[in-house]
């Protein structure tokens, strides 16, 4: 009888140890979140258009005439900037010091590129941006309804496209869930079917900052349809305050591979 009780006590102790070990393993599980990428600059371009006037040299434009003439101009928009490029990476099983026990090379993947003005996004508190969030961002960048009526953040993103479904860590966003989204151009033209390069406005409730996210493609033809293919295209606002055209707003980039 005493022997059976001793065996039962040993079994209970062993079960308690196994339970404690299992809980410790559960506590160590961490879900993947967007990571800070290594960045390689490829180019930095702007329009070649200058302030040189267009010469009108018509011999028939003599005195005593009224000449009707339409003018059509495309001017570089200094209230916005864009980033395009490709993404490479790997899946790794590593510790807090960055040492990997194994890595998996990724030849083809999907995911998102995130851009924001802060470096510590609370990814579990990210939601679709609403009108209040966008108004806050417009105030930060001086994108007003009076002086930027056509190209402010609200007019650029609001209900401009229905985005595809995507995820942020464990958070799932269904198609067209967020109101503020666009599809950037393909081959120098608006997309007819809005199938590529979705860009959506999200908001971090913890830090009260807007998060710009674009859904990655896999080497797709982008805004220029020549010899270059891109994994991402993303537009970001710049300060529209007078005298700040040459001021560059710093942004933080994050990548999530799926």
Image: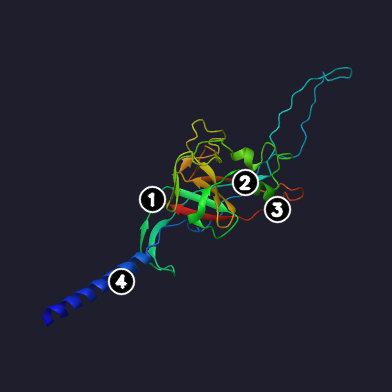
Q: Which of marks 4 and 1 is nearer the N terminus?
A: 4
Q: Earlier in the sequence, mark 3 or mark 4?
A: 4
Looking at the rendered image, the disc whose residue lies closer to the viewer, 2 or 1, is 2
Looking at the rendered image, the disc whose residue lies closer to the viewer, 4 or 1, is 4
Q: Vertically, is 85 above or below 27?
A: above
On the rendered image, what quadrant is the N terminus found in? bottom left
Residue 21: percent from the left, percent from the top? 30, 71
- As rendered, which of 111 and 19 lies closer to the eye? 19
Question: Distance from label 3 to label 4 (Cα)?
Answer: 56 Å
Residue shown at 78% from the left, 34% from the top? 53
Residue located beneath label 4 in the image = 20
Question: Distance from label 2 to label 1 (Cα)?
Answer: 40 Å
Residue located beneath label 1 in the image = 107
Q: Judge from the rendering whether residue 37 lies leftward or rightward of residue 108; answer left or right.
A: right
| Mark 1 Cα shell of 10 Å, populated few (<14), some (14-19), many (≥20) | few
Quarter holding residue 32: bottom left
Looking at the rendered image, the disc whose residue lies closer to the viewer, 3 or 4, is 4
């Amino acid at each position: 009888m005493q022997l059976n009780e001793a065996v039962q006590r040993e079994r209970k102790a062993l079960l308690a140890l196994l339970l404690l070990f299992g809980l410790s393993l559960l506590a160590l599980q961490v879900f993947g979140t967007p990571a800070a990428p290594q960045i390689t600059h490829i180019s930095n371009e702007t329009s070649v258009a200058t302030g040189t006037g267009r010469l009108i040299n018509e011999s028939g434009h003599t005195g005593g005439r009224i000449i009707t003439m339409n003018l059509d101009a495309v001017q570089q928009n200094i209230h916005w900037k864009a980033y395009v490029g490709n993404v490479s990476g790997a899946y790794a099983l590593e510790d807090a010091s960055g040492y990997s026990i194994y890595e998996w090379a990724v030849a083809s993947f999907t995911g998102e590129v995130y851009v924001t003005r802060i470096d510590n996004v609370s990814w579990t508190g990210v939601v679709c941006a609403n009108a209040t969030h966008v108004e806050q961002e417009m105030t930060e960048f001086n994108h007003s309804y009076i002086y930027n009526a056509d190209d402010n953040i609200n007019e650029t993103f609001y209900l401009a496209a229905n985005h595809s479904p995507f995820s942020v860590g464990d958070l799932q966003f269904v198609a067209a869930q967020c109101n503020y989204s666009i599809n950037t151009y393909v081959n120098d033209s608006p997309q007819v079917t809005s199938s590529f390069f979705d860009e959506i406005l999200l908001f971090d409730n913890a830090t009260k900052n807007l998060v710009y996210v674009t859904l990655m493609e896999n080497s797709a033809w982008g805004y220029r349809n020549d010899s270059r293919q891109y994994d991402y295209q993303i537009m970001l606002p710049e300060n529209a305050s007078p005298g700040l055209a040459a001021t560059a707003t710093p942004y933080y980039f994050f990548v999530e591979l799926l």
